[in-house]
Amino acid sequence: MAEPCRAQTRFCSSSPLRVTAIVVTDGAEALLAPGAEHPDAVLATATLPTVSGAALTRALSARTSIPVVVGIGDSDGAAAAEALAAGAAACVAHPYRLRELLPILRAIRPDGLVEQQPPLEVGGLRLDPSSMEVSLHGRLVRMPMRELRLLQLLMAHADRVVTREQIRDNVWGGAPGSNTITVHVQRLRQRLGDDQVDPRLILTVRGVGYRLVPPPAAVAS
């Protein structure tokens, strides 16, 4: 069962996280629900009828910035790995336990992310935290939450080197290896139309990290 759930983001350390869950019955229906309901997160089991958890994650990542959390059972290891490779934000044990699930929802939609941060504009690149939308020269660029966070960090330090350690701590909380960061940078370049061989937007500073070069504010006609 897939469970797209709208998490009301008015919470703080002294108040509980309030969650409204919208339950759908299979992966095919779950593909349609986010467009109609605009949830803050999607919670889906790794193995779904009709459309797999990985296929659902891949489809949502391609057209929205809604984070997907995958519920895994004892025998779902391979399916969970496929969903994470497709762009899922996190995994949680299934059957779900609120004490495990709520901290993950807090982590992927932290307090203040939506209401307190103004849009970032770096040349022709714009990221709006309130809508979780990215545009380049006015063209909307869809990306999953992890890549959006990576881009947000690079934009906040435009024209300055962001180290791999900074990326690991700020985007993954200190978890991933170097190759994971490299893969996400490559995916981000692809979405932004940057050249993988000779990048002009996200530059690799060998042995250190990455530097975002502000794109022109307007494209010459």
Image: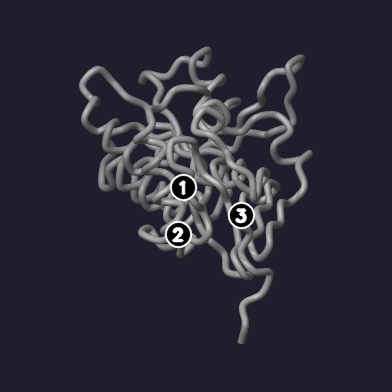
Where does the image place residue 12, in percent across and percent down from the top left? 74, 22
Q: Badge 1 local density, few (<14 within 10 Å), some, or many (20+)?
A: some
Q: Quadrant of the N terminus?
A: top left
How many marks on residues? Answer: 3
Where does the image place residue 169, in percent across and percent down from the top left? 54, 26
Circle 2 SS class: loop
Query: What residue lies at 39% left-to-right and 35% top-to-bottom?
Result: 44
> Mark 1 to mark 3: distance in Å?
25 Å
Q: Quadrant of the C terminus?
A: bottom right
Q: Badge 3 local density, few (<14 within 10 Å), some, or many (20+)?
A: some
> Mark 3 to mark 2: distance in Å?
23 Å
Viewer-side label of 3, 2:
2
Which residue position is annotated with label 1? 204
Which residue position is annotated with label 2? 199
Which residue position is annotated with label 3? 133
At label 1, which amino acid type do we have? Thr
